[in-house]
Image (cartoon, grey):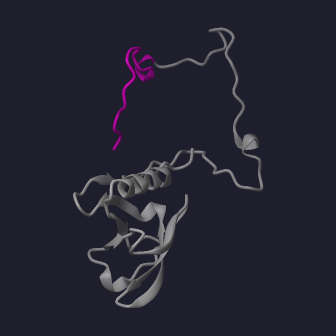
Amino acid sequence: MLSSRPYLARALYQWLLDNDQTPYIVVDAERDGVVVPEQFVQNGQIVLNIAPTAVRDLFMENEAITFSARFSGQPMQVVVPLEALIALYARENGVGMVFGHEPVMPGYVEPSSEVDAEQERPALSSVDSEESAPERDEETVPPKGRPSLRVIK
């Protein structure tokens, strides 16, 4: 599956604007691909105002957040790969979201435009009888009942 981070970031950004809040992002400035004004980086992080009045040509794509801004009067093109996005919040009240590290799915290959995504997916097979079903350890089968989420650290 694709990362949920860019989708959540775009939705949260729009929600903050719809509520007349000023969206700020916290960025891990030490990640590869990050282009930010180094003179404002503190403890490896930088906080940036991404309100429409503060930036130009803001693009929140699946790979990165990019925009133009002026820092100390100097224009700069800022690039924030989505993996470097730590948080997005409102300046006025701190409401927002801190993004955790997303797990890497083993064996997942992101579909490219050159290869049909359907070809990369493994074929699903059904089990007709218990004889051909693989044996399962009873401890690994979750108990039936209400679904719940579990935090994995």
Tell me how many marks there are: 0
Tell me where residue 24 sits by quadrant: bottom left
Q: Which residues are magenta?
A: 138-153
Q: Nearer the viewer, residue 30 or 20?
A: 20
- Which percent across, then down, holds residue 55? 43, 75
**Residue depicted at 46% across the width and 55% down the height:** 10
Quarter holding the N terminus? Answer: top right
- Which percent across, then down, holds residue 125? 70, 23
Tell me where residue 92 sits by quadrant: bottom left
Tell me where residue 29 sits by quadrant: bottom left
Instruction: Tell me: 112 left or right of 143.
Output: right
Q: What type of secondary structure mainly makes up the magenta span?
A: loop
- Which percent across, then down, holds residue 34? 46, 74
Looking at the image, residue 83 lies above or below residue 71: above
- Which percent across, then down, holds residue 86? 36, 61
In the picture as drawn, the residue positioned furthest to the bottom comes out as 73
**Magenta span contains residue 148:** yes
**Residue depicted at 29% across the width and 59% down the height:** 90
Instruction: Tell me: 140 left or right of 153.
Output: right
**Magenta span contains residue 115:** no
**Residue depicted at 72% across the width and 31% down the height:** 123
**Residue depicted at 24% across the width and 57% down the height:** 94
Quarter holding the C terminus? Answer: top left
Q: Nearer the viewer, residue 15 or 35?
A: 15
